[in-house]
Each structure stands twice: as C-alpha cells, then as structure tokens.
Amino acid sequence: MTAPIVIVGAGLAGLRTAEELRRAGYDGGLVLVGDEDRLPYDRPPLSKQFMRGEVDDTTLRPSAFFPDKRIDIRLGTAAVGIDPTARRVQLASGAALDYEHLIIATGLRPRHLPDLPELTGLHVLRSHADAVALRSEVTASATALLVGAGFIGCELAASFRAIGAEAVMVEPQATPLASVLGTHVGALIARMHREEGVDLRCGTGLITLHGDDTGRVRAAQLSDGTEVAVDLVVVGVGSRPETDWLAGSGIELTTTSVGGGVPTDEVGRTSAEGVWAVGDVAAWRDETGVCRRVEHWTSAGEQAKRLACALLGVERPATARVPYFWSDQYDVKIQSLGTPSVGDDVHVVADDGRKFLAYYAREGVLSGVVGAGMTAQVMRARPMLATPTPVTELLALS
C-alpha cells in the first residue's frame, strides 16, 4: 500500500493544503497532524472579535468535514522528528508515520522577552488557549500594557479600548508598524490610536515587571525611566518559525533569509526529497530569487494551491500574484497590496482623519498601496501592481 501524504501542522496552511490536494484530484491517504487538541481554527479573530467577546468559536471546519473528505486528523500530538531517508515522521505520542510526501506547516511560536519575572498576568497571544487566558483577565476596569506596536499590539489595543479597558502601548521604534509600513504611514496609525485613548509611547521599551505578594504583575518599569501601574501585560514582539523538531533531520533551515524558516523553491519544495513546506514556517523563493516568509492569511491559501498542483503534477493557470494583507483596528480596515517596504518612497494621496491612502514606490515603480478605510481605492490598484507601473501614473489620477 502506498504511504499517505502527511501534513504536520493543523492550522490554516495545513488545512488549506489538505483541501487543495483533494480539490486537485488526490485520492490517496491524507493525514493531518496537529499539536493542539482543537480542530483547525482561524487565528486573526483571536485578537479582535474573540477578544471582544463577539464570537467564541473560530473553528474553520466542523468535525464531520474530515471523515467526509477522508482526512485522518490527529490532534493533540506534536511531531518531534523526521527521517527523510526512511520517509518517516515521529510523533510525541510515540507513534511513527510513514509518508510518501511530508508537508511542513507548523507555523510560528511567539517570541518571549528574556529575564522577565514569571508573574500571573503576563501573556503572549498565538493560540486559542492564549486568547482564552487573556480574555478572562481583560475587564473594563483593567489597565493593560502592550509591549510592541506590531499587528498584535495594535489590534489588541483597539479591542481593549472597545471593551473599556485602558491600554498602554510601548514600542522601541519611532511609530507603530514602522518595520512593516515605515514611519510615514506608521505616524498615521499612531494618531488613530492616540485619538482612541491609547497611551502610546514610541521610542520606549520594557525593562522589567514588578509583582505583588501573590505573584501577580502590578507595575512595569519602562526604558524612559517611568513606572506604570498595570493589571496585565501582553508581549507582542514577533514570532519565530516552529522548526526545532526538524533538528538533525538534514533538512535545510535558514536564519539568514528574510524571516528565517524552512527555505523552499517557488512551489514549496524543501532541500529533502518528498518534503515540502507551506505557510508561516516556509521561506518560499520569490520572483527575485530571495527566500522569504510571508506571515499573512491570504498567502497561506495561495501557497497551498501552488504546492498541491506542483506535488500532483497538475497544471494551474498562471496568475499574477499580488500580496495582500489587512488588519482591523477600531472601525477601520487597514489594507496593503503589493510589497511596501520601509525603504520605499511614500506618497500619501489622501488623509481624511482616520482614513488614508498611500502609494509606495521603488525606483519610481509602484511597489505597494496601503489604505485605511479606503477599500475601493486600494483594490483598484491591484492591476497596476501585477505589472510594473510608474507611480506617476497613479499620482496623476489622485
């Protein structure tokens, strides 16, 4: 009997890959392995609708979906090793799975700040369990410290303010999201948070935390010399690829490519025969030849389609890929198309309070469009990002 395709990682990328394999005509054995006890679920709502108490369940597919699609889903057991020569993956449960193809979709784990005391009320947010623990402590009377003004910090600040909690957000860089969107657009996002009552302190970091006699966090010492009374702390300083279980496998890993992770070719093949990688853990080779990770919801589905077709030898119609991501903060949807970079020239062509639209250009060519509350204007630029377009063409229309 032919060994199955085994997908390690039962998040969005793993689930989408399983679905795309079936959609592309694969009829063989398919095993989906996840280290959490929950069915695959959607992560973006955890910092938003789930945190505000608007939804309690973000499960992507009901339990009946998996037997219906003949997907053998194994939850609550992590993969702990792989032998690419024997084509076998070892599980924490003690079981071993032989595979014809293995797809790595293990995602990320949140980074922790070193040397902080272990106190009740100190959180990170990645998993459903993380979100449950954090939501149980957030009340209208609470003061929360958000360490890092990236997407997690900004979205949680908006959610906390929506339920009446006070939010202090510290960020060592000059603005929120500076490393993603640059300081020009970051300043517009900073303005929105301050207008909503967030105590935003840029150019400031966390030194340490202090607790009370019960071991609960009560104060934070900041790098600007101040001390802030807090009831809970969320550290959102980025994540790293979940690749520890691949140590000793011989599969190439990288810390030098953009974002690190498991480097692959343009359809997800790794350095090992029959082993593929998809989603946040995977550093796919882009059109410029650089292997980079893209930590966005839409890219997981796009990669899953490309990988499934390549693995099965099925032709897929060529389409121009325009990267896309979004972030919901307060009543505004912030959207990005293309590959905006901090080194690009930024042209803000609309700034109407909380709504704005910015064009990014690299050597005069449109590289990205970022907008807040301006969905139609952002999406209108998609065709111009699919082919090289002088930014002057868009500026002339503004």
Image (cartoon, rainbow, N blue to C red):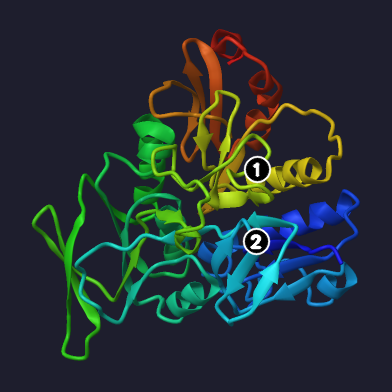
Q: How many numbered discs?
A: 2
Residue 354 on image: x %, y %: 48, 41
Residue 120 place in picture, x, y as percent:
30, 82
Q: Is residue 125 above or below residue 275?
A: below
Query: Observer-nearest residue: 137 or 89?
Result: 89
Q: Is residue 176 above or below residue 243?
A: above
Quadrant location of the N terminus?
A: bottom right
Q: Can residue 332 be seen in this view?
A: no
Which residue shows up at 65% across the image and 67% down it?
41
Question: How many neighbours does mark 2 have within 10 angstroms: few (below 14), some (14-19), or many (20 or more)?
Answer: few
Spot occupied by residue 218 in the image (x, y as percentages of width and height): 21, 77
Badge 1 element:
loop
The numbered dot on residue 228 is none
Q: Looking at the picture, does residue 366 appear above or below residue 134?
A: above
Q: Position of residue 307 (x, y in %)?
A: 73, 44
Quarter of the image where one finds residue 368: top right
The mark found on residue 86 in the picture is: 2
How far separated are the C-alphas under marks 2 and 1? 21 Å
The reply to whether the C-beta atoms of the residues labelled 2 and 1 are less than 8 Å apart is no
Residue in the image at 79% along x and 77% along y: 63
Nearer-the-camera pick, 393 or 173: 173
Q: Which residue bears the numbered disc 1?
A: 268
User: Looking at the rendering, in which quadrant would you find the C terminus?
Assistant: top right
Amino acid at the residue labelled 2: Ala
